[in-house]
Amino acid sequence: MKFRIVTIFFLLSVVTTMGQNKKSKGDFLFFEYAYADAIREYQKELRNGSLTVQQSLNLADSYFKTRNYKNATETYLNVYKKDSTMSNHYFNKMLQSLTKTSGADRAKAFLATRTSALPNELLENANFNYELFGSDTGIQDFSIFNINANSPQSDFSPTFYKDRLLFSSARSRNSKKVYAPSGEAYLNIYESRISTDGNINNANEFKRIPGFQYHKATPYYAKGLDNLFYVLSNAEDGELSFDDNGKNSLAIGSVDRNGTFEYLLRDLSTSFYYPFYHEASGKLYFAANFEDGYGGTDIYFAYTNEGQLMSAPVNLGPRINTPGNEIAPFIFENSLYFSSDVFYGLGGMDVYKSNIQMDETFSIPINLGIGINSASDDFGFIIKNDDNGGLLGYFSSNRTGGEGNDDIYGYKVAEKPGLKTVLIRGKVVKHNSVVGVAKASLRIFGENNELIKETATNEEGEYRLEMPWKDNFTLEVTKERYSVYTKQYNEEILETEQNSSLTIDLTLLDDLVEEKESQTVIKLRKFYFARGKTLITPEIAFELEKVVTAVKQFPQVQLRIESHTDSRGGGSTNFRLSQGRSDAIKNYLLQQGVPAKNILYSVGYGEDKITNNCTNGVYCIDYLHKQNERSLIVILNYNLLY
């Protein structure tokens, strides 16, 4: 099989140095991308002795690249059994092979053995997409067609250029120079007009970019700048440039409206792929295989000023980048489309969509599903609004039925591709503070009160909960000894609020209560009725609102209202007065919505429970008498609540 992967250079193997170990013939063939030959040599070396761990992984990779997934699986597993600390990048390829040979369930079982070593974002992404594949939610009807301009060679990486389409191709350009790993010509950029039906017919070499005898490919046209960004081989004075290990990497260059060329991202030991310039933010997105990434090739961005780099590359983080390879970023209507060969996809490279939030974080990347994606490699996805009111786009694939190694496919679709999701995120905090509440439970209930989704806050109280779109649902947040938070969502609320961070305030029951007279009571500032009266004044009502709030937050509390008087006046009069005050408090609480079932008793004790020496016949100043005049809201079941 022709070596296709380096031709489209999005799965270039990260060159692993062999330290001081002497490289074998199998190693040299592997690093020259001659995988079939490398397999034969490694098998010979294995028969005559043994392979190092790295050589075993090279052999597994060679099987993987030649689509011998059965042997790849066995070889990866043998390494994993001996050394379960294999890098996440190799672990991803092992899970890919397992999925192809034994199905997703076996891959999930191995995934469960490594959860502590993988980013939480990766596990959330995997679970979400596994759930998605288990349902028919969000399946879209794509009208897909193979464009007429495809050749028997590799054609890929389409991009819009005015009324035309640019793309990369390995078709011959009348040169004897051949790129050895692919056996095809060095990559070049071609253009063609887009016909009224979206098809692409005749293609010609794109002349706006300066002539170059080595690779130039994956262009992106920034309309506002009138600049072209693209990838090209590192070269000086017409000769390829190599690093100290003999590696020729790929750089990103640009050509301005005057035809002036400059290198933008260039490192002889690092390859850069698929530039995309975001006009609204001035960010230049690209893929690169930096050694400190999350896997093979990750997506990064750099800030620019009118296309001139102004910052170091910034990794998009573990929500987007995985132990696999991520390439081909493209932003349309605040959604990031890109391709990844992460293990939970449908095949090799799949196209995913992630929504960009207001704080520039990303939602869970959603697999676009069967149609755009296949069991083969699907990548280089672009999209725009069509003149007919729908959407028109293109992508690349090496699926069966094409003209060559990689073909460009067009598609039409009525609505923006990708499952619409609900994302609720933010922080759960303790009442009247910014202190996060750890391990609080968040649950989503549907219209029939069925549990749809649940999660828990992290140690800082932060949470993130994402699910397929629903017009109506209820969010419930709970934690033992804390108040219950509920919020009902409908389509209108979701459209305006779901991209905002939601801070949820929970009250700790212990903060609402105190011990008084050997009882647990709701914490209130002391209040007084008018002399000899039972009228609820505004000052009393203000304090009783705390009781109303406490019952709403803890609807299971059982209360006893008790009132006391001082010793002044007759005993029977004081008893009736205290009972009247307790009943007045009860009636007020009922009027404010406190359920009657929460108030078990309202009791007046008169002067029976004097707290100091101011009993009948004892002279006391008014201040001391007032210490005995009080009302308490007792929680009878406090010790039984949790």
Image (spheres, rainbow, N blue to C red):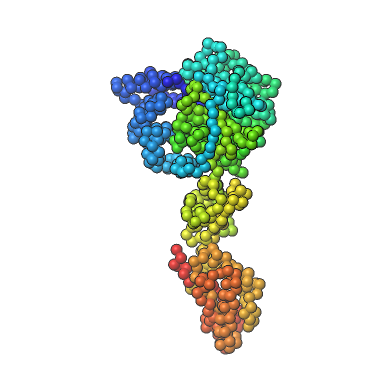
Q: Residue at x 50, y 19 (%)?
A: 152
Q: Is residue 519 above or below residue 169?
A: below
Give the residue furthest to the right.
258
Give the image location of residue 12, x and y in percent.
48, 25
Q: Tell me the quadrant of the picture where the C terminus can be found.
A: bottom left
Frontmost residue, 298 versus 213: 213
Give the image location of residue 524, x and y in percent.
58, 69
Give the residue furthest to the left.
48
Q: Is residue 187 above or below residue 451?
A: above
Q: Is residue 359 above or below residue 149?
A: below
Res 390 quadrant in image = top right
Q: Tell me the quadrant of the picture where the N terminus can be found.
A: top left
Give the image location of residue 308, x and y in percent.
65, 28
Q: Residue at x 56, y 38 (%)?
A: 417
Frontmost residue, 207 versus 559: 207
Give the residue furthest to the top.
176
Q: Is residue 10 above or below residue 555?
A: above
The reply to whether residue 354 is visible in this rendering is: yes
Q: Residue at x 59, y 79 (%)?
A: 581
Give the image location of residue 638, x and y in percent.
47, 68
The reply to whether residue 296 is visible in this rendering is: no
Res 329 quadrant in image = top right
Q: Residue at x 47, y 53 (%)?
A: 451
Frontmost residue, 239 versus 617: 239
Report the number of numbered marks. 0
